[in-house]
Amino acid sequence: MKLWIDDLRSPPDNGWFWTKNSSDALVVIRLAAHQGGVILNEISFDHDLGGEDIAVKVANEIERLVYLGHLKMPAWKIHSANPVGRANLERALRSAERFDEIWLASGTDARVDARVAETDDARDAPEDYHGETSKDGECHAVL
């Protein structure tokens, strides 16, 4: 599945699943992480999703789920014109890529076991994780 996150601009073609806010995008991301039947291949982000809603919420959740081993990192791109928003999205997504590389380097796909365990507890973090999960559930990692 290809996920397009943007409140105004429509996807470039019909091959994208379009979500217009972070709440709907989070539902798709969490289904991909916990159901196993939805395979997320690519995500394209706009940053500003109307009002106070921003796509960094989605990027932070991807970072958290990849870190926990619940989600394999999909390909991603940012089509936002907001330079600060773009930088914030890139920071979270690049961190998620590093966590994905750690899982890949483990030699086995322990992510399957992590997903089956259904633990969202940050105490089960890889040793390279130096961030924290805040009360709002967002992962703020520092490598």
Image (spheres, rainbow, N blue to C red):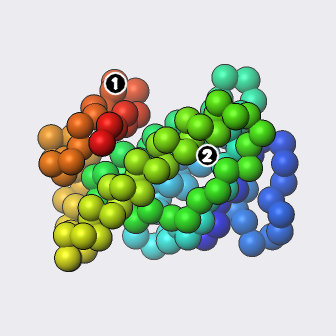
State yes or no: discs 2 and 1 in contact (Cβ < 8 Å).
Answer: no
Q: Is residue 112 visible?
A: no
Residue 46, picture quadrant = top right
Q: Secondary structure at mark 2?
A: helix
* Residue kind at label 2, given as amino acid type: Asp
The answer to whether 3 is drawn above or below residue 26 in the figure is below
Q: Residue 4 at what x, y percent from top left?
A: 70, 56
For the image shown, how many numbered marks are present on the structure? 2
Relative side of 60 to 13, left or right: left
**How far from the left and from the top, in percent, is residue 30?**
45, 53
Q: Is residue 33 left or right of residue 1?
A: left
Q: Residue at x 40, y 70 (%)?
A: 36
**Which residue was labeled with disc 2?**
24
What's under tag 1, amino acid-wise? Lys
10 Å crowding of disc 2: few (<14), some (14-19), many (20+): few
Residue under label 1: 135
In x, y percent, where is residue 6? 74, 46
- Asked if residue 37 is positioned above or below residue 65 in the image, the reply reads below
Using the numbered discs, state the Cα–Cα distance from disc 2 to disc 1 in whole angstroms. 20 Å
Q: In this rendering, is residue 74 above or below 82?
A: below
- Secondary structure under tag 1 reads loop
Sequence-wise, the earlier of marks 2 and 1 is 2
Please provide percent x and percent y for residue 89.
56, 41
Q: What residue do we see at 34% from left, 24% from top? A: 135
Q: Quadrant of the N terminus?
A: bottom right
Instruction: Report crowding for label 1: few under 14, some 14 to 19, many 20 or more residues within 10 A (C-alpha).
Output: few
**2 vs 1, front mark:** 1
Mark number, residue 36? none
Lateral position of residue 84 relative to residue 102, left or right: right
> Which residue shows up at 35% across the image and 61% down it?
100
